[in-house]
Image (spheres, rainbow, N blue to C red):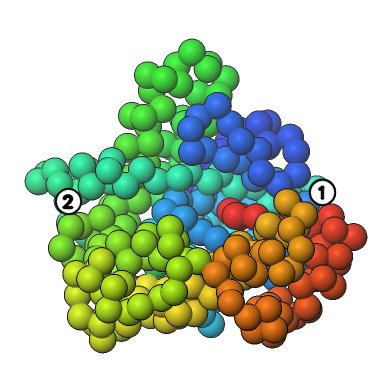
């Protein structure tokens, strides 16, 4: 196991030359290198698996803390905002990880196979979870990154190896979360439909009856399931989406606070400023200036 982890670390390091995210020629695969610890920052996790081989990272979802290190993988089965913090990384021993976006139709196709063995389910019910990497998972990840050295093989082999990675995840106790999200009719799957609708329509007024209709469940059941998966209510989720989108638009596209507030659905600028200050710790103008001065860009992070 140690040797396989070291081999995967060498392959990630060889292709992740730059700090931060290093996109690759394999769709959905991003390699990360970090060399310094960070303060807490907001990150949005999408359905994905992140395999860590060096360094340590802490993820906080609604007060539930997940610690990722060189022996773990982080599985996100839904789109969810969370706090992230790199707690151990250096020039000599950088944090190295590989992020792989999950193709949910592929996940569903694999789950539908009758020969897929059942495994003992984790008691964990959140939309993200941390598990111990296995020999099979490390081997598949190493072969996937190895394709970067023979780009002509990527169109033919990458999909097969990614299917194997999904299979390896499903064979772990944490795979139950992915199985539930992908299974049509399961309450987690229905809640994921509501989450997807919210992400696409966060600027619109939120009516719980409409959202419950999208999820095909009662309002009270949706509230319970939504909080179980995301550690927040639908309204809190919508608010975070609005504030993070407004922040990104001001930082990256130069929008002023008023324009950004209206664009993400706020009708009151004073309410936007209050909620922004409460969430990010500073009023919009001061926060954006501090980010620009520090050259920190809040993005989806693995």
Q: Secondary structure at mark 2?
A: loop
Q: Is residue 60 above or below residue 129?
A: below
Q: Residues within 10 Å of mark 1 (few under 14, many from 20)?
A: few
User: Going from the N terminus, do you reach mark 1 or mark 2 first?
Assistant: 1
Quadrant in which residue 207 is drawn: bottom left
Residue at 39% across, 46% down: 102
* Point 41% across, 65% down: residue: 198
Q: Position of residue 199 (x, y in %)?
A: 44, 61
Q: In this figure, what is the number of numbered marks?
A: 2
The Cα–Cα distance between marks 1 and 2, rounded to whole angstroms, is 42 Å
Residue 224, percent from left and from top: 30, 83
Q: Which mark is residue 91?
A: 1
> On screen, 206 above or below 291?
below
Mark 2 Cα shell of 10 Å, populated few (<14), some (14-19), many (≥20): few
| Residue farthest along the left direction in this orientation | 114
Picture coordinates of residue 45 (x, y %)?
51, 59
Q: Is residue 264 left or right of residue 171?
A: right
Taking the image as shown, residue 97 lies to the left or right of residue 230, namely right
SS of the residue at dot 1? loop
Left/right of residue 61 with respect to residue 249 in the rendered view? left
For the point 45% across and 21% down, which residue is it? 154
Asked where in the image residue 269 lies, by quadrant, the reply is: bottom right
Which residue shows up at 90% across the image and 60% down it?
Answer: 293
Camera-side residue of 299 and 246: 246
Disc 1 and disc 2 in contact, CB within 8 angstroms? no
In the figure, residue 155 lies in which quadrant? top left
- Residue corresponding to mark 2: 117
Q: Position of residue 297 (x, y in %)?
A: 74, 55
For residue 185, say whether it is visible. Answer: yes
């Amino acid at each position: 196991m140690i040797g396989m982890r070291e081999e995967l670390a060498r392959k990630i390091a060889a292709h992740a030359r730059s700090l931060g995210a290093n996109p690759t020629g394999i769709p959905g695969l991003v390699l990360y290198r970090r060399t310094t610890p960070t303060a807490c920052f907001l990150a949005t996790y999408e359905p994905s698996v992140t395999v860590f081989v060096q360094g340590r990272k802490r993820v906080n979802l609604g007060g539930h803390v997940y610690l990722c290190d060189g022996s773990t993988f982080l599985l996100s089965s839904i789109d969810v905002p969370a706090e992230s913090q790199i707690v151990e990384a250096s020039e000599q021993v950088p944090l190295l990880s590989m992020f792989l976006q999950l193709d949910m139709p592929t996940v569903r196709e694999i789950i539908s196979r009758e020969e897929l063995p059942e495994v003992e389910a984790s008691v964990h019910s959140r939309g993200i979870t941390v598990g111990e990497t296995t020999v099979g998972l490390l081997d598949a990840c190493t072969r996937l990154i190895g394709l970067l050295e023979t780009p002509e093989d990527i169109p033919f082999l990458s999909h097969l190896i990614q299917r194997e990675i999904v299979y390896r995840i499903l064979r772990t106790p944490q795979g139950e979360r992915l199985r539930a999200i992908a299974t049509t009719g399961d309450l987690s799957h229905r809640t994921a439909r509501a989450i997807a609708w919210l992400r696409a329509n966060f600027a619109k007024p939120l009516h719980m009856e409409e959202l419950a209709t999208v999820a095909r469940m009662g309002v009270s059941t949706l509230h319970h399931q939504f909080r179980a998966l995301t550690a927040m209510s639908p309204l809190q989720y919508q608010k975070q989406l609005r504030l993070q989108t407004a922040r990104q638009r001001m930082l990256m596209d130069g929008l002023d606070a008023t324009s950004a507030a209206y664009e993400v659905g706020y009708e009151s600028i004073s309410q936007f400023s209050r909620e922004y200050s409460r969430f990010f710790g500073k009023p919009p103008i001061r926060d954006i200036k501090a980010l620009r001065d520090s050259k920190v860009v809040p993005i989806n992070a693995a």
